[in-house]
Each structure stands twice: as C-alpha cells, then as structure tokens.
Amino acid sequence: MDAVQHVFKGTFIHSTTSCDCEIIENHILGTDHAGKILFFEDAQKQSILAQKWGFDESSIQELGKNEFFMPGMIDTHIHAPQYAFIGTGMERPLLEWLAHTTFPTEDTYSDVEIARNIYDSVVRRTLKNGTTTACYFATIHTDASIVLADITSRYGQRAFIGKVCMDRNDAYEKYCETTEDSIKETERFVEILKGKNYDRVKPIITPRFAISCSEGLLTELGECAYKYDLHIQSHISESPAEIKEVSKLFHGYKNYTDVYNRNKLLTNKTVMAHGCYLTSEELKIFRERGASISHCPNSNISLCSGHLDVRNALSHRVKIGLGTDVAGGYSISLLDAIRKAIETSKIIFMERSKNGRDNNEIGNEKKPNGINGDAQIGSMETENNFKVLSYKEAFRLATLGGSEALSIDHITGNFKVGKEFDALLINPEAQDSPFDNFSHTSREDLLQRFLYLGDDRNIKAVYVAGRCVVPFPKNT
Ligand code: GUN
Ligand code: ZN
C-alpha cells in the first residue's frame, strides 16, 4: 500500500464535461497519500491494479449493495456569521433584512469568542451535510475571519474565506470601515492567511456589494485581487430595490455589471451571487470575463428577491454553481439548493406557459401544440424551448458546476484521475433514513430519491482530499 492510501470498490456517480450524471458500477478507485485519485477502473482489473499499485486486495473497502460515492458538494456562496440566526427573521425583503437582522448580528463578531462558537458550528454542520468546499463570507473583522479560516482548515473543509469589505453603510452606520482600513485589513488578512500555508483554505477578496462600497474601495480591491492573484466574490442584481440603489449611487456606469467590470472585479476567478436580473448584455460580459454566478434559489425565494433563469444563463455559457446563501437562505444543505433550483426552474416554466396562454387568449401568439394549450406538461418544454432543469443537471450544478464556478475544476468536482478525492459515501438505506426504498428501485432512482428526500442521515462518510472528515475524527 505504499503509493496508495485508500482503495474503494463499488458504484460511483458523478458528472463529466459531457454527461450530467454518469453512473459507474463495479469500479475500483484508489487514492494516494496526497488525497489524489490514482486510478479509477473496472473492478475486473482488481488483481492487475493490486499488482501495479502495490496494494493488498484484502485492504479494499467494498461499498454496500445500494451504497454509492458521489462528489462532495460545493457551496459557492454562504455567510458563516449568519448561521447565528438561520431559519429566523425571514419576513423582510433584502435591504430591510440586512439593516434589521444581518448587520447588527455581524457587528457582534468584533468579539472573537462569539465568532469562534458560531464558526465551529457552521463548519461542522456544512461538512455533515456534505459540503466539501465552501465559499464563505465572514464579517468585516479580520481576526474573526482568521478564526474561520483556522476552523475550516482544522476540520479539513476546502474553503475560500472572505473578510468582508464595506466602507459605506447608511442602513446601520456602526457596521462599517473606512476605505483605508478596509484595504489595509484586507491586505493584513491575505498576508496572514498566506503565512499560514493552509493546504486547502484560501483568502478571497470580498466587497460586500456595490451599495456598501465606494468607487474608490472597489477600485483598490480590484487592484488587490490582481496583485495577489486572488479569487473575488460579491453580490449582484439580487433584488429590484438593490439595483435601483446601485444606479443611484454609481453614475456613469452602464449597469450593475459595469460597476464591477470597470473596477477589475470581474475575472475568471470571480463568483457573483444571485444575478436574478442580469440582462443578456451583462451575461455576455460575464462570459467574456469568465466570471460565474452562484445560484442561491432558497434565498431568492425567502427574501422575495426574484428568480435566476439558470437555463438562460447557461445558454450564455456562463459558469454556474449553487449557493445556500445562509442565512438569506434558510437551509445549510446543498440538497435543498438542488431542490429549490429545480423548483425555481419549474416556477419560471409555469410563468412562461401561463404567459403563453394569456398571449394566446389575446391572440398574440400561435397556440401551443397540444390539448388546450397544455402540451408542455408531458415534456416540460415550452414553445420557446424552455426546458425545466432536470435533477441530473441540478446534481451537476452542485458538484462539477460549483468547481467550475470557483475555477477549481482542475482540482475537484468529479472522480477524474488526478483530481483530489472529495466525496460523499451515500447510503440510501441508512437505518434512520428519511425515505424508503423498495426492491425494484433502480440505481438512478436511488440517486434521485436521495437528492429529493435524503439528508445527512444518508451521508455515511465525507472525504476531502482523501481524508475522512465525517464522521468527525476524535481530535476535532
Ligand atoms: N447583499 C449584500 N449583503 C448581503 C447578504 O448578506 N446576503 C444577501 N443575500 N445579499 C446581500
Ligand atoms: Zn449572500
């Protein structure tokens, strides 16, 4: 076993660049001591592989009959400090919610011990729910943000950590920095994290959103990202009131995207949350820059912000991942994000179908083909070719799509040889499983049921770069 750390045998389900959901049965996957996938081949080759890689066949860890591995899920947008009030305070729209609930809570993270307690909980909870990579917003407080980085690293989660930057906050004045401090503290944060040399935890430049940043701050953060070659995250086009405010604050810019673009904040390492109202012109800029969108459907609905038309964004060839946006979104689980992404797509479909019918009634468009204009139900496809998101596509968004959105698809996202082994061992028949299976259930339906009905009770183990991080080791 010299070169090899783990050898697993059984079923593996993942997405590839050409297939949203590939089910690979009776395969053997081996990892090395750095957590990389060394080989992934048909189990018929077991003896040859054992010889080639020098492992003992008795050391193979064989999966149970209905168990399978899937790639770890990637949360491309989550606010760690907001875990403190998850599932509460959801009665206000975005800007009111920020002023009333979010800013006062985040302000308390000047106290590092408050931060430590919540950050420990959010990292444990996300990992247990299968989030192997998380792209976190912290708060404006550098020391507390470093605590979040330490905790993610100790638990072994792959993470981007953003010290939040905001030099403008009329809604809650005390939760704000000067422009100078925001830059200085960002550089201090980046330097400290660099010095820590974590394997899989990285800083990310984090202007909160255009409303809370001066033009000067955006410009300097763009330069800082360039200087250190860093990832960038923020929010964009989440709600109508927000967009209106941005247009009031930023004169001389064409649109919201232009504000970030002209300040060098749209790169191929940028992930922007929401994007519900991005125009075709803006999506084209995203595509040109290689920037991505974090689709946060729970939050979009919970804060009554709007919907992202994933199909349209994908047709513009913009990279898309899923985000929980805790605590604008009330669920920590990417499984929930998968479900809400599908449901959002169906809502858009129904709206379009209804409009089609309405248009029909007033005689503007030709009748949809089918009985009473309801033909879409069978195929879930409208005349203008709108197809609802399938569970396989949503599965891809939560895994490979997320890795593409964060530009780490050369490292993680599926079970390609050479990538790091970030994986979930799923047991659809766990003793306390929240759903039932019947003898005739196909492998595909086991996956589908897990995605629609499963939860952390079905996640038997979580691996990040070959290290088993759930069940939690005794020393964490
Ligand atoms: N826009 C600016 N800050 C936030 C935040 O914390 N959550 C969400 N959903 N949108 C934001
Ligand atoms: Zn957010």
Image: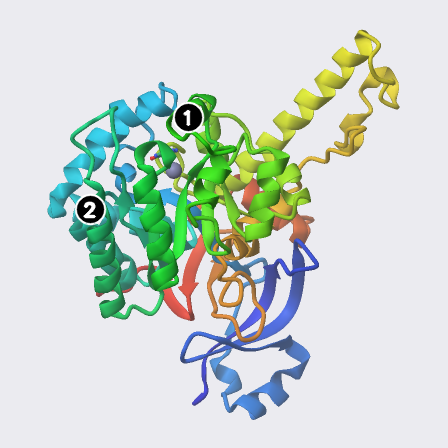
Residue 208 percent across, percent down from the top left: 33, 39
Pointer 1 residue: 242
The reply to whether discs 2 and 1 touch (Cβ–Cβ < 8 Å) is: no
Q: Secondary structure at mark 1?
A: helix
**37 left or right of 382 in image:** left
Query: From the image, which quarter does the N terminus lie in?
Result: bottom left
Q: Say whether disc 2 or disc 1 marks the residue closer to the N-terminus.
A: 2
In the foreground, 113 or 446: 113
Query: From the image, which quarter does the C terminus lie in?
Result: bottom left
| Label 2 neighbour load within 10 Å: few <14, some 14-19, many 20+ | few
Residue 95 percent across, percent down from the top left: 35, 24
**Numbered tag placed on residue 180 in the rendering:** 2
In the foreground, 182 or 82: 182
Q: Classify residue 193 by image quadrant.
A: bottom left
Identify which residue is drawn at 48% across, 57% down.
72
Residue 196 higher or lower than 14, as above or below? below
Callout 1 amino acid: Glu
Residue 357 percent across, percent down from the top left: 77, 14
Displayed-image quarter of ligand 1: top left
